[in-house]
Image (cartoon, rainbow, N blue to C red):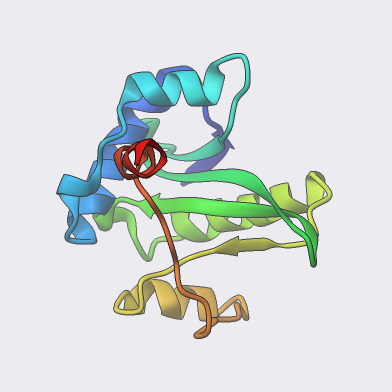
Amino acid sequence: MYTVREGKKADLPAVFNLIRELALYEKAPQEVTNSVELMETDGFGPQPVFGFFVVLRDSDQEIIGTAIYYYRYSTWKGKRLYLEDYIITEQERGKGAGKLLFERVLAKSLEDNCTGMMWQVLDWNEPAIKFYEKYGASFENEWLNCHLQAEEIARLIAS
């Protein structure tokens, strides 16, 4: 019914469409400033910074999901796989594609000798939370996400 495989450069336009679909679902389409061209450089350039899997519907080989990951280093835990985005098209949710894709990412973390895997989920995304609970995922309340945009960093450094 579904096949999961490593992502290829040719998959990026379809993957980027999934990213935009996720941004709409999360009510933040204006936040997407990435592009297929940047993803080509960042994923397939001389120093790739992310990897990804795609899940295809066997009947027509259409990409209906993706999992985008990279590695981070925890001074307490060591090498960790960070699942940046995990997306299944709305019409394919609940049919098994997500389970196959998620379990492929779990396996990747072990193949690459990671001490574990981590990701984020929005506190209002009940379907995703319930999905992760089936795997026994831990949810943290204490940590706050922090970020600065490149323009803000440049302004701070210049001042």
Query: Can you give x and y, in whole percent of width and height, for residue 130 in the image?
Result: 44, 80
Query: Can you give x and y, in whole percent of width and height, for residue 86 in the image?
Result: 44, 53
Apparent side of residue 128 relative to residue 111 in the rendered image (left or right): left
Q: Is 15 rendered above or below residue 91?
A: above
Which residue lies at the image location 37% right of the left edge and 66% below the top edge? 94
Q: Is 57 rendered above or below residue 11?
A: below
Q: Is 141 rendered above or below residue 131?
A: below
Query: Can you give x and y, in whole percent of width and height, for residue 7 in the image?
Result: 52, 30
Q: Residue furthest right?
A: 113
Which residue lies at the image location 22% right of the left edge and 47% below the top edge? 31
Please give the count of numbered marks on the rendered protein.
0
Q: Residue furthest top?
A: 46
When asked about the image quadrant of residue 152, the answer is top left
User: In which quadrant is the C terminus drawn?
Assistant: top left
| Observer-nearest of 2 and 137 | 137
Query: Can you give x and y, in whole percent of width and height, for residue 98 in the image?
Result: 46, 57
Apparent side of residue 83 relative to residue 76 in the rendered image (left or right): left
Which residue lies at the image location 49% right of the left edge and 51% below the top edge? 84
| Observer-nearest of 126 and 103 | 126
Which residue lies at the image location 24% right of the left edge and 43% below the top edge? 20
Q: Is 72 rendered above or below residue 57?
A: below
